[in-house]
Amino acid sequence: MGTVKSLNKWANTHTYYPIDILRIALGVFLFIKGFQFMQNIQALNAICAPLEKITGGMLALHLIIPAHLIGGLLIVFGLLTRWAMAVQIPLLIGAIILNFIGDMNTSNLILASITLLVCIFFLFYGSGKHSADYYLKMQQ
């Protein structure tokens, strides 16, 4: 708990608008990606075809869309940002692994890798000063 408080204190003193814009852009990107997967479920099935052989593969397939939609909205508003990132990171690691197991698509690999790095950054940085978390904390 002390580590999270010290990370929050550091992030709130070193908050800048470009970092908040990056957080919001990441949330919008994840939300749009979840919406695209929801509209084109066949493409998601094709991407996740190597998971059919693994136990629980279909569960992962059904987790991707709601995690991206809900997590993206939470990240945009800066509400429970670290929790949302903690849910996104395993999905993004899975997306990177799927590129090596299935058909290699370099653009998807680069996109998933960059998104993973940004999510890891915000896992430590948090939501920042311009977020719903900070606003709700100041209302106490």
Image (spheres, rainbow, N blue to C red):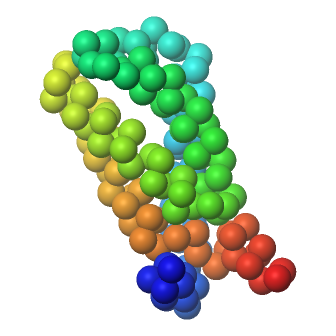
The foreground one among 51 and 131 is 51
The structure residue drawn at horizontal position 22% and vertical position 29%, both measured from the top left corner, is 99
Quadrant of the image occupied by residue 91: top left
| In the depicted structure, whether residue 86 falls above or below residue 8 | above
How far across and how far down the image is residue 111, in percent? 33, 41
The foreground one among 85 and 115 is 85
Q: Is residue 64 visible from the viewing direction of this image?
A: yes
The structure residue drawn at horizontal position 37% and vertical position 22%, both measured from the top left corner, is 56
Q: Is residue 133 left or right of residue 31?
A: right
Q: Is residue 25 visible from the viewing direction of this image?
A: no
| In the depicted structure, whether residue 99 falls above or below residue 139 | above
Q: Is residue 45 left or right of residue 62?
A: left
Residue occupying the far right of the picture: 139
| In the depicted structure, whether residue 26 falls above or below residue 103 | below
How far across and how far down the image is residue 83, in percent? 54, 57
The foreground one among 5 and 97 is 5
The structure residue drawn at horizontal position 53% and vertical position 84%, both measured from the top left corner, is 5
Quadrant of the image occupied by residue 67: top right
* Quadrant, the C terminus: bottom right
Disc count in the image?
A: 0
How far across and how far down the image is residue 114, in percent? 32, 51
The structure residue drawn at horizontal position 31% and vertical position 12%, both measured from the top left corner, is 52
Q: Is residue 67 left or right of residue 43?
A: right
How far across and how far down the image is residue 94, in percent? 30, 36
Q: Is residue 94 left or right of residue 69?
A: left
